[in-house]
Image (cartoon, rainbow, N blue to C red):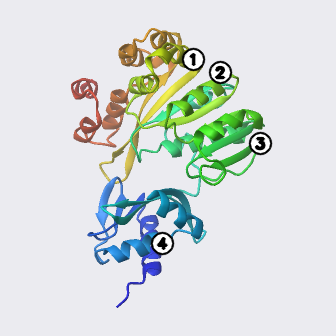
Amino acid sequence: MVRDIKQELNELLHAVIDRGGSDVHISVGRKPTLRVDGVLVRVEEKEVIGEDDAERFVMEILNEDQRARFLENKELDFSYNFNDIARFRVNVFMQRGRFAAAMRLIPTAIRTLDELGHPPILHNIAKMSQGFFLVVGPSGQGKSTTLAAMIDEVNHQRPCHIITIEDPIEYLFNNDKAIVDQREVGQDTKSFNNALRSVLRQDPDVIMVGEMRDPETISAAITAAETGHLVFSTLHTNNAAQTIDRIIDSFPPSQQNQIRAQLSGTLLGVLSRRLIPRSGGGRSAAFELLIANPAIKNLIRENKTHQIDLVIETSAEEGMISLNRSLALLVKKGEITYEEAAVHSMNPSELRILVSR
């Protein structure tokens, strides 16, 4: 009997929505798999995916133009509208010469900063007229969700022109007080770098760059912040100090002093997110938040980023919070176990002291 790929795909996408999951994985040699609360769960009632099945799954979700680009490049990022029920960020790729896909569910509603449990000081960041703010963390920890919340807060707060550059477009914004123009790499522009080179001619007030992937994009984003724009972006780093080092180290040594000076002059802050499994199911967010006060700016200029963690730890009155303090608070509230917190801590011995206080 021929496998009904279209019907099965519909069932899988409904399943990840109904179970409150985040991802669907299609890979040869295993059953379709969902990620629920951060854990991979096989869909046991489905058959193991064969090579022909995987190809048919992938081709089912691609249009003609996407098929051509995928077959040429062997991988492709795009957004997929599932029967006007939900949207997914999709990456299709080849592995060992066979087709595979990862589909990330994009919630239809944009949650607010308060609903996400973010530190209240982020409301102040959204009110700034210029500067550079980064949301960082591993994949799947809610970076895009946080950026969407911040952009939508600006959208509801003041009349301005917001331009987003994304690959692909994830959350869809409805114009409120602001005009929000969303550009997708591959469809509306050739690359992040190309879009950033032209964005200053499009009269923006706020710019959101989905991801900073190379030195050219980083440099263009910092320059936009220097020239009077509020710029938001993401990086796949673990914490604030590592983020600063990653930005600086992506440039040749001859340019690093200049980048340090530019970054120290434009940086507003860095938010690092972790989603931690809750004791009773679901996940809770833990944060590290750096606010670029004069002490932080001075450390960046003087290449003393190893001291950033100490400043974060001693600057709670300015709204900063270390990851360990955030984890300890979740443990004391009973939302997560100490054991789970320790797994995600960069300094478990310090965490133990904070929890015991």
Callout 4: helix, strand or loop?
A: helix
Question: Amino acid type of disc 1?
Answer: Gln
Question: Amino acid type of disc 3?
Answer: Lys
Badge 4 or badge 1: first in the primary sequence: 4
Q: Nearer the viewer, residue 132 or 291?
A: 132
Q: Nearer the viewer, mark 2 or mark 4?
A: 4
Badge 1 or badge 2: first in the primary sequence: 2
**Res 316 quadrant in image:** top left
Callout 3: helix, strand or loop?
A: loop
Reading the image, the residue beneath label 1 is 262
Question: Amino acid type of disc 2?
Answer: Glu
> Residue at point 49% right, 9% down?
298
Residue 58 vertical position relative to residue 238 in the rendered view, above or below: below
Badge 2 or badge 3: first in the primary sequence: 3
Q: CA distance from mark 3 to mark 1?
A: 31 Å
Residue 133 vertical position relative to residue 39 in the rendered view, above or below: above
**Res 12 quadrant in image:** bottom left
Reading the image, the residue beneath label 2 is 226
Reading the image, the residue beneath label 4 is 59
Badge 3 or badge 1: first in the primary sequence: 3
Q: Nearer the viewer, residue 261 or 253?
A: 253
Q: CA distance from mark 4 to mark 1?
A: 45 Å
Residue 312 vertical position relative to residue 224 in the rendered view, above or below: above
Cβ atoms at labels 1 and 2 below 8 Å apart: yes
